[in-house]
Image (cartoon, grey):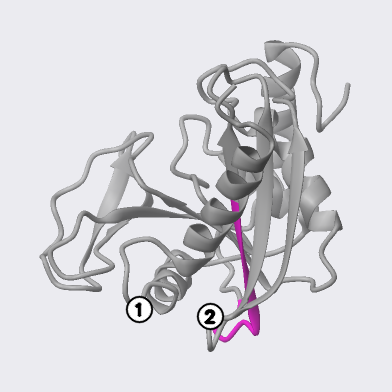
Amino acid sequence: MGWLTPRTVEEAYAVQDRLRASVDAVGPGPDAPATVAGLDVAYAQRGDRLVAAVAVLDARTLAVVDSAVVAGHPAFDYVPGLFAFRELPALLDALDRLTVRPDLLVCDGHGLAHPRRFGLACHLGVVTGLPAIGVGKTPLVGTWVTPARERGAGAPLVDGGEPVGRVLRTQDGVKPVFVSVGHRMSLDNACARVLALTPTYRLPETTRVADRLCRAALAARGGAG
């Protein structure tokens, strides 16, 4: 059974169960990473093609120091809770093409804040061995109280009676993001890294750059089709 490209839903669940045991949700992880990578995927309108992008930024200046883009096809059917399998091969291919190995992966998605406690950030972290966090625009699971309006305010994201992440306000008065641990990070450090990556906008600069890269590459390939 392939850990990367399972053939059935049952195989995919088994892969998640096996790899989930390797997740390090304690960390603490790097508190001063030199480089941070953002990962994102854009899909063609019909959903049969995708482009994966990885952008590596200098963690201090937020300047882009490396990037890679890979075009491909979804590697797995759309199944709730198994979305990572659609994107993993392309994202790993893009990571392999980098010349700079990042100190931290910031995924446009979730880590432990996932129905099976093994979202994309967990999967990528365990497979690569790199510290990883998930920063979602919307929640996948959980309940929370609305955090205060000030930048840096947060509230626990709770699912099934256990904390799985934090609802974090990255700018005064804007909608919060949903931060969760992927691998080799503590939640406090994950949130600190997210705030360091959001000096101006709601989303981390890593996510914003990776999003632009994959959308531009998709458009160049006739992505509307």
Quadrant where the image shows the C terminus: top right
Q: Which mark is residue 62?
A: 2
Q: Is residue 33 magenta?
A: yes
> Is residue 121 shown to the viewer in this render?
no
* Residue 37 coordinates in the image, percent (x, y): 63, 66
Q: Residue at x 60, y 25 (%)?
A: 82
Q: Is residue 114 magenta?
A: no
Q: How many marks?
A: 2
Give SS at disc 1. loop
Q: Residues within 10 Å of mark 1 (few under 14, many from 20)?
A: some
Quadrant where the image shows the N terminus: top right
Q: Residue at x 47, y 68 (%)?
A: 205
Q: Residues within 10 Å of mark 2 (few under 14, many from 20)?
A: some
Q: Quadrant of residue 113?
A: top left
From the viewer's side, name the closer residue of 156 and 58: 58
Q: Quadrant of residue 29?
A: bottom right
Among numbered discs 1 and 2, the one appearing first in the sequence: 2
Magenta-tinted stretch: 30-39
Q: Is residue 147 above or below residue 215?
A: below
* Residue 159 coordinates in the image, percent (x, y): 33, 37
Q: Residue at x 38, y 72 (%)?
A: 198
Q: Amino acid at mark 2?
A: Leu
Q: Is residue 13 above or below residue 179?
A: above
Q: Is residue 32 above or below residue 1?
A: below
From the viewer's side, name the closer residue of 59 and 156: 59
> Is residue 50 shown to the viewer in this render?
yes
Give SS at disc 2. loop
Q: Which mark is residue 199?
A: 1
Q: Residue at x 40, y 68 (%)?
A: 191
Q: Are marks 1 and 2 in contact (CB under 8 Å)?
A: yes
Q: Which mark is residue 95?
A: none
Q: State the residue lying farthest toward the right.
A: 1
